Image (cartoon, rainbow, N blue to C red):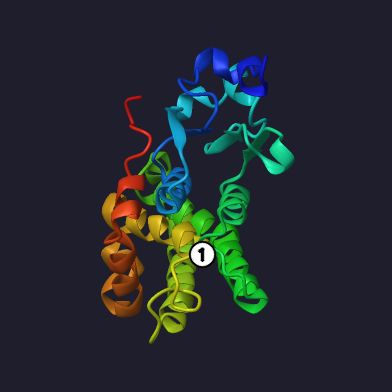
Amino acid sequence: MGFLSEHKINSRWPASNPDILQLYSFPTPNGVKVSIALEEIGLPYEAHTVKLNETTTTEFLALNPNNKIPAIIDPNGPDGKALALWESGAILIYLAEKSGQLLPADPLQRAEVLQWLMFQMGGVGPMLGQYGYFSVFAGSEIEDPRPRQRYQDEGRRLLAVLEKHLAGREYLVGNTYSIADISIWPWIRAAKVFYKADEALGFSSLPNVMGWWERCMARPASERGLTIPSREG
């Protein structure tokens, strides 16, 4: 029996084609990073909808003990060995290296792409996510305005960094679409579309960020990735 067929996650989310990469995810800003990358790369894969209330099941925890989407199993990993991997940033790097796409070969540009990827992982994602929690979701019921204001201010600061960097640039690094762009722009979309944060985060004063976001959104493969996997499963 193969790695995937023996893995506990396969009992809840069975693979139709166990010979290709398996994605376990949900279309959140973090989740769609991986589906966007897979669509851009053109690597065959099978997507499984893992709803957010299913990430604490024993089957999913067997794949990701941190109980967060996304996660993957690649039956054709390094040296032909199966690989189970979680954390969206780590998955993006792995897919880029596996495919030779979305990550420059030039060492200087590669380092810069990874820098902006970490900027998202440590800054944009957590800060905008917390802003969304305290402005739209359960945290909005908290009367104390300080948490929301803290994340709004930090979100504005991070967006100002992006705005300055994107002046005269088509994409974040070397004018070539990369995992740096893929990691960040779904969070801009979430803030604008789902958090309705145009005024709070000052999007009208960020023409470089908005133009870059629109270019990323206009890519057919990236647009497809936004709806994978289905929310309904």
- Is disc 1 surrounded by few (<14), some (14 to 19) or many (20+) residues within 10 Å? many
Where the C terminus falls, by quadrant? top left
Name the residue carrying label 1.
Answer: 180
The total number of labels drawn is: 1
Residue 68 seen in render? no
Is 50 situated above or below 8?
Answer: below
Secondary element at image label 1 = helix
Query: Residue at left 42%, top 35%?
Result: 26
- Name the quadrant of the N terminus: top right
Q: Is residue 25 above or below residue 115?
A: above
Q: Is residue 94 left or right of residue 14?
A: right
Q: Residue at x 45, y 72 (%)?
A: 176
Question: Quick check: 202 left or right of 39?
Answer: left
Picture residue at 44% right of the left edge, 77% below the top: 175
Residue at the far bottom in the pictured view: 168
State the image coordinates of residue 7 (x, y, percent, origin top left).
65, 19
Residue type beneath disc 1:
Ala
For image coordinates 49% across by 55% down, the residue present is 147
On screen, residue 221 versus residue 93, left or right, reads: left
Q: Position of residue 11 (x, y in %)?
A: 55, 12
Vertically, is 143 above or below 154? above
Examine the image and state in which quarter residue 67 appears: top right
- Pick whichever, 15 or 215, lies toward us: 15
Residue 71 horizontal/vertical position (percent): 56, 36
- Give the x, y percent position of residue 79: 73, 41
